[in-house]
Image (cartoon, rainbow, N blue to C red):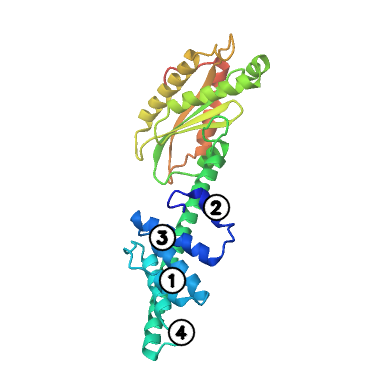
Amino acid sequence: LIRLGRRGEAASWLRDTADVDDRLVRLDSLRGELAEAGDVEVLPFLEGFVAVALIRLGRRAEAASWLRATADSSSSGARSFRAWVRAEALTPAEPDVALAANRDYGTLVARMRWSARTGVLTAARSKIVEEKLTAEHAILAREVMHDPLTGLENRRAFDHWLVSAPTQSRPTALLLIDLDTFKAVNDRHGHAVGDDVLRRVAQILAQHVRQGDHALRLGGDEFAVILNGSPGGDETKLRRVAFARSRAVRAAVAHREWDDLAPGLSPTISIGVTCGMLGPRRKETAEELYRRADRDLYIAKSRRSVPDSP
């Protein structure tokens, strides 16, 4: 009925208590409609299930009449099921040895095909579950390593970087960014505005990193940018890039329109910049790079600027 677009009637069949003969008349009518519609998928199952029901009711002759020579389904499961029902319906109650052997063989083949189909379905379900778990794990991993307010990577991701040395020596630059007098922004304009300021600064940082670099929120009003050079690359060149990037970020914050958040709002940032060579055979570690960048940030905050050059 659903196949024929008669969904309302389909629900009534689950509650209908009409006798068997009345149902057979209705089913025969539906069988005709499916045949006229050229259906080859549902019809074999409809005929097969009705035939099975009639066999179980002891009406074997009527069961055989339900197994017409309809067009073959594209489903091997439908074909096997229909062939098995036909064998059951056409086999006498007490068949001779040859006929019984033929029927048993057909039953065996049908069961083997059904088992194979069940195996495919089980494998498909397992694959779906596996892919779902993989997707859920990826989502959880992102949530664990990302800041919910800004969408940037978080302190946990930064700490992971601190203890994970690259497998090849490469120049690495670290920018530590701190909003100046951010407490005054919260006190004067409220924490909601403060959160919007953090989001906008995060957007600016995200716009100034390349693929393979990292923009992070370390907590509060503290941010970081990690610039990764190419393995075996030039440290001096990356240092120039890092200072140019820090000036660009500071200018972007200074020139951003802030009045739409709160009148008179004009946040500024200080940036500490450092660069070094990290790798498995290098004496310098990410922790040492972090300490140097922190010292540079302290100096930058004291003068509220970023050096024009390394």
Q: For label 4, count other residues whose C-alpha is less than 10 Å away and answer few (under 14), some (14-19) or many (20+).
A: few
- What's the residue type where badge 2 is placed? Ala
| Inter-mark Cα distance, 4 to 2 | 36 Å
Relative to 74, say whether 53 is above or below: below
**Location of mark 2 (residue):** 11
Q: Earlier in the sequence, mark 3 or mark 4?
A: 3
Question: Of callouts 4 and 2, which one flags the residue occurring earlier in the amino acid sequence?
Answer: 2
Measuring from the top left, give residue 282's x and y in whole percent.
44, 42
Q: Amino acid at mark 1?
A: Ser
Residue 252: x and y in percent read 46, 17
Mark nearer the viewer, 4 or 1: 4
Structural distance between the alpha carbons of marks 1 and 2: 31 Å
Q: Which residue is mark 4?
A: 93
User: Helix, strand, or loop for circle 4?
Assistant: loop
Residue linked to disc 1: 115
Could you tell me if the residues under marks 4 and 1 are in contact, i.e. CB atoms within 8 Å?
Answer: no
Give how far across and how far down residue 12 sits, in percent.
Answer: 56, 53
Residues marked 1 and 2 touching at CB (< 8 Å) = no
Task: Point out the tag, 1 or 2, that comes first from the N-terminus.
Answer: 2
Considering only order in the chain, which callout, 1 or 4, is on the residue closer to the N terminus? Answer: 4
Sequence-wise, the earlier of marks 2 and 3 is 2
The residue labelled by disc 3 is 31
Q: How much space separates mark 4 and mark 1, taking CA atoms?
A: 27 Å
